[in-house]
Image: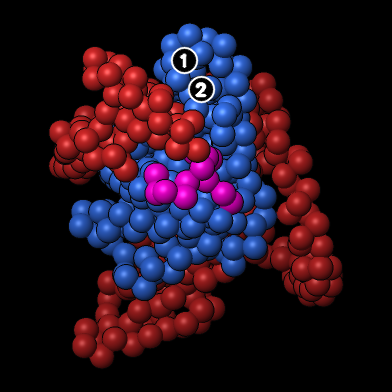
């Protein structure tokens, strides 16, 4: 072996000595021009330093830039290119991928059917006495229209990409963007309740920050006594994906089972009012702050997000579900609320 | 394999890995106990590059792959965090694997499956840790250490599993492309056949 390998080594050295961009030839060679023999093809120290500094600079610039970060235009360009690719892959592979989920959840679905049948009977009973509530609701709706606060028009969209938990943030991409009239700070809901808000848009996609994200804070109102508070995400989307509720009035004690709805921001941005967020499951008393902290179970199942609706101004030019439930526009994607 | 072919293959692999990571894997119904951790395919492509190519190339690939991961939707964290993490992964994996392979017993430049898995696990731990720690420094999402550690370990397990498939696939593809261009490569470097064939 030494006899076989030795002769080519000498020409190696001679040739490589004149061959300036040596590192590119790296992996093929057992022996290279690098002085440190084991580390052939090593990046030079200045290159490593440059890359690390570039990364750090980028972080600082993006962090310091805040909402008007100079990285945002770049982000948008990348999104314009990759968004359609993600949407295409999702459309093509979606039905196949859903199949695995269907197989996996078969057992739990059986249980769910049994439980739902049980609840259905209970609800049918309740429906019998719903006439009074209906009348009151119609009255309230009329009042709301009178006040100029027309309900919400929804733009249906599908979730086409989900950020992985390794990034420690809970975001999804939906397949509607600036061309459908979306812009950052719009409310996103699904048929159960509040999903999140739009943080950035490209022409055909938008990124949604879920309310379970650690960075998310939503103004919440306890449904039956109208107490105001703030709902914070805790960063876990799954079964332990809970939310924290802190009430403004520290003397009021939340009770398990109470529903919390959005309180609404000025102009409905980023959150419109009256969308269900979650249900109080546990209440902790903070002795130090003499206040209460409630744990909410979100009404939305964040691990199974698919069809969502973005709250848009009534009269937006696209496929839109208007407040009265009528569907306008080209493609009927089903009701989102 | 060298030059434009190598670059093109790596770029295509990274874009495919990125799209699969955000659009395909989350819907596969992994038994992830609802944590939302999916195999980091982009990271594994960088690890495979570090094992099969030279360190300089792997570091650059890691940096730009990370940059893409930072900017492509639905990323919403501070840009540059994955770029730093994956650049480090490319450098560390490339450096360590070449140190080992150039020992006296080394015969080929394709590492075995055991080495590939170890590299994937190590690279995944390093990459996810660097990402998590930059998050702590920047307070990007303010997260407790317990959660960080749990997610990082979960990600390492996922990545190691996925490496069984991804790393050999990358080796196979780069090998095929290298073979296709070998007539051309022979003109540029007449040296490799001389040594290998006699052996």
Q: Chain of mark 2?
A: B
- Specify start and end residues of the magenta stretch as a single range: B102-113
Q: Quadrant for residue A113, please give it.
A: bottom right
Is residue B140 magenta-colored?
no
Q: Is residue A195 left or right of residue A325?
A: left
Count numbered badges in the picture.
2
Q: Residue at x 39, y 44 (%)?
A: B102
Q: Residues within 10 Å of mark 1 (few under 14, many from 20)?
A: few
Q: Is residue B167 left or right of residue A264?
A: right
- Which numbered mark, 1 or 2, is in the foreground of this view? 2
- Which chain is blue in the rendering? B
The answer to whether one can see residue A167 in this image is no
Find residue A331 and report its horizontal and vertical position in percent: 69, 25
Q: Residue at x 27, y 28 (%)?
A: A33
Give the main secondary structure, helix, strand or loop, of the magenta stretch.
loop
Find residue B39 and report its horizontal and vertical position in percent: 54, 51
The answer to whether one can see residue B145 in this image is yes
A96, above or below A101, in the image:
above
- Which chain is red in the rendering? A
Q: Is residue B114 left or right of residue A328?
A: left
Give the SS element for disc 2: helix
Q: Which residue is mark 1?
A: B190
Q: Which residue is mark 2?
A: B194
Give the SS element for disc 1: loop
Residue nearest the viewer, comparing A34 with A108: A34
Q: Residue at x 31, y 70 (%)?
A: B144
């Amino acid at each position: 072996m030494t006899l076989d390998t030795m002769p080519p080594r000498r020409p190696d050295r001679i040739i490589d000595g004149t061959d300036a961009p040596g590192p590119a030839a790296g992996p093929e060679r057992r022996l290279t021009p690098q002085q440190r023999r084991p580390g052939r093809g090593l990046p030079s120290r200045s290159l490593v330093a440059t890359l690390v500094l570039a990364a750090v600079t980028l972080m600082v610039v993006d962090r310091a830039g805040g909402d008007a970060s100079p990285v945002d235009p770049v982000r948008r360009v990348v999104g314009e290119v990759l968004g359609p690719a993600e949407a295409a892959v999702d459309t093509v592979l979606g039905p196949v991928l859903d199949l695995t989920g269907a197989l996996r959840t078969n057992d739990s679905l059986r249980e769910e059917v049994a439980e739902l049948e049980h609840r259905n009977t209970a609800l049918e009973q309740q429906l019998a006495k719903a006439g009074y509530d209906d009348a009151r609701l119609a009255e309230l709706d009329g009042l709301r229209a009178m006040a100029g606060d027309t309900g919400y028009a929804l733009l249906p969209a599908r979730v086409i990409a989900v950020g992985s938990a390794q990034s420690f943030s809970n975001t999804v991409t939906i397949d509607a963007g600036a061309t459908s009239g979306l812009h950052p700070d719009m409310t996103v809901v699904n048929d159960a309740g509040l999903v999140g808000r739009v943080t950035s848009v490209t022409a055909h996609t938008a990124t949604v920050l879920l309310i379970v994200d650690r960075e998310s804070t939503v103004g919440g109102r306890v449904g039956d006594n109208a107490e105001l508070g703030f709902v914070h995400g805790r960063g876990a989307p799954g079964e332990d994906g809970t939310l924290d509720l802190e009430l403004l009035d520290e003397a009021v004690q939340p009770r398990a089972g109470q529903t919390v709805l959005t309180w609404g921001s000025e102009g409905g941005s980023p959150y419109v009012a009256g969308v269900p967020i979650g249900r109080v499951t546990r209440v902790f008393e903070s002795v130090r702050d003499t206040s209460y902290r409630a744990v909410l179970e979100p009404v939305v199942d964040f691990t199974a997000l698919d069809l969502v609706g973005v709250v848009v101004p009534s009269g937006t030019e696209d496929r839109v579900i208007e407040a009265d439930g009528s569907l306008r526009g080209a493609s009927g994607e089903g009701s989102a609320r | 394999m060298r030059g434009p072919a190598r670059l093109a293959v790596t770029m295509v692999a990274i874009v495919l890995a990125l799209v699969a990571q955000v659009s395909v894997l989350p819907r596969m119904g992994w038994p992830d106990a609802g944590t939302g951790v999916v195999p980091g395919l982009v990271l594994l492509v960088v690890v495979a590059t570090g094992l099969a190519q030279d360190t300089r190339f792997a570091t650059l690939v890691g940096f730009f792959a990370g940059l893409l991961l930072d900017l492509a939707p639905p990323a919403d964290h501070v840009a540059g965090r994955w770029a730093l993490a994956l650049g480090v992964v490319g450098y560390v994996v490339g450096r360590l694997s070449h140190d080992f392979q150039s020992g006296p017993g080394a015969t080929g430049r394709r590492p075995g499956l055991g080495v590939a898995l170890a590299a994937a696990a190590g690279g995944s731990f390093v990459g996810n840790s660097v990402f998590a720690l930059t998050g702590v420094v920047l307070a990007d999402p303010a997260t407790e250490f317990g959660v960080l550690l749990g997610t990082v370990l979960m990600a390492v397990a996922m990545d190691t599993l996925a490496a069984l498939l991804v790393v050999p696939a990358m080796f196979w593809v780069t090998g095929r492309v290298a073979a296709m261009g070998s007539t051309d490569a022979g003109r540029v470097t007449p040296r490799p056949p001389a040594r290998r064939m006699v052996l």
